[in-house]
Image (cartoon, rainbow, N blue to C red):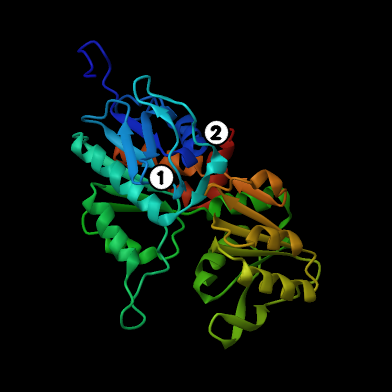
Amino acid sequence: MVPSGSEKFERIVLLSDYASVSLAQEVYRYLDKERIYGEVHEFSPEDLYINRFNDLETEVVLNTEVRGRHIFVIKSFSTAQKRFPYDYKSKKWEQRPKLSDLALDPDKGYVELFTINNALDLSSVSGITNILPFMPYLRADKKSHSGEPITAKLMAKLTEASGANRIVTVHPHFQQVQGFYDRAKFEILDSRVLFADWLLDNYSRDELAIIATDSNSAHAVDKLAGDLRVSHGIAYKSRDRPGSVKETRIMYDGSLEGKIAVVYDDIIDTGGSLVNCAEYAKRKGAKGIIACMTHPVLSEKAKDMLVENDIRLVTTDSILIPDKDAYPNITVLSLGYLLAEAINCITSGRRIHQHLYNFEGFRKVKKSRGL
């Protein structure tokens, strides 16, 4: 339906897949609708229809006016693995996918993303921003031996080719991924301020010791420890064969006796490295283990392993955890405010607010806004 001249032109449209509906609602709630240039279309989960054909190919339909608009697509990589009955005449679900029907599937997730982008591109939108809180394949960032693909670069090229003009992500495993994009602008947000804020709300500085799982996460850990003004250390692993850790030691300037060991990294996958760190920290007298991990991949039996080893996981909603309520040791922090602030800046032509990277600034803004 083309708007009549008396209707307001809603320049900004926010879309999401089913796994990201709660996050999108949080983002919409935090949007500074008074300061955004142009009207913001009220968020509705029904504006984007995603299903599967009987042969399990991806089916996408846009159910709202998008021509000439700037579209922000919040896309997860948790997808439905089967087709769900839908009435095309009434545009209503006969059986709607539930969160428990969704599973992390990067391959299907990327195909959905490309299909959504293509539908938007063919609809003559003014811009397509993909908000991908978690980006799969970033560990495939280089060619280590003959015959190995650089899948992170391949996905970047396909995302651009499907129509995306801008990518927004959070704490990527491989920050240099932005160099894989030739045309699309790339924005990186940092979840560190959320973790630092939560830790200081729940513990005193004297209790905390920040630990990096390996040298790859050492730089991020150094920043988090600096925000909190506490000491930090790094875990070193010796291997007896590829994929097998013989021993883990933590190099820490001081004693872990009576400390809360906070293990910080971007991803928790199987949780093996985390458990090794936790066991060593406990042997050295740590009274508790907290894992601050941005992206809860939690493959295999990782969630049960956390319970068995008495590890508390603090993570974000970058990836859906359908059975989270069954694990009281898992705390999920919302990325809604960070993503909303990014959209506020992008739509008004401003740089991303510095308080999203500066912890003291973040605390000050949070207090002033009553968040």
User: x, y (%) of residue 251?
Assistant: 65, 80
At horizontal 50% and vertical 73% (from top left) the residue drawn is: 216
- Disc 2 versus disc 1: distance between alpha carbons? 28 Å
Q: Quadrant of residue 279?
A: bottom right
Residue situated in front as seen by the camera: 212 or 160: 160
User: x, y (%) of residue 34?
Assistant: 39, 25
Q: Quadrant of residue 31?
A: top left
- In the displayed structure, 24 sits above or below 91; it is below
Please state which amino acid type lies under the numbered disc 2: Arg
Q: Quadrant of the C terminus?
A: top right
Q: Secondary structure at mark 2?
A: loop
Dot 2: within a 10 Å radius of its alpha carbon, few (fewer than 14), some, or many (20 or more) residues?
few
Q: Identify residue for label 2.
A: 369
Residue most extreme to the bottom: 240
Answer whether labels 2 and 1 touch (C-beta < 8 Å): no
User: x, y (%) of residue 190?
Assistant: 47, 54
Q: Identify residue for label 1.
A: 75
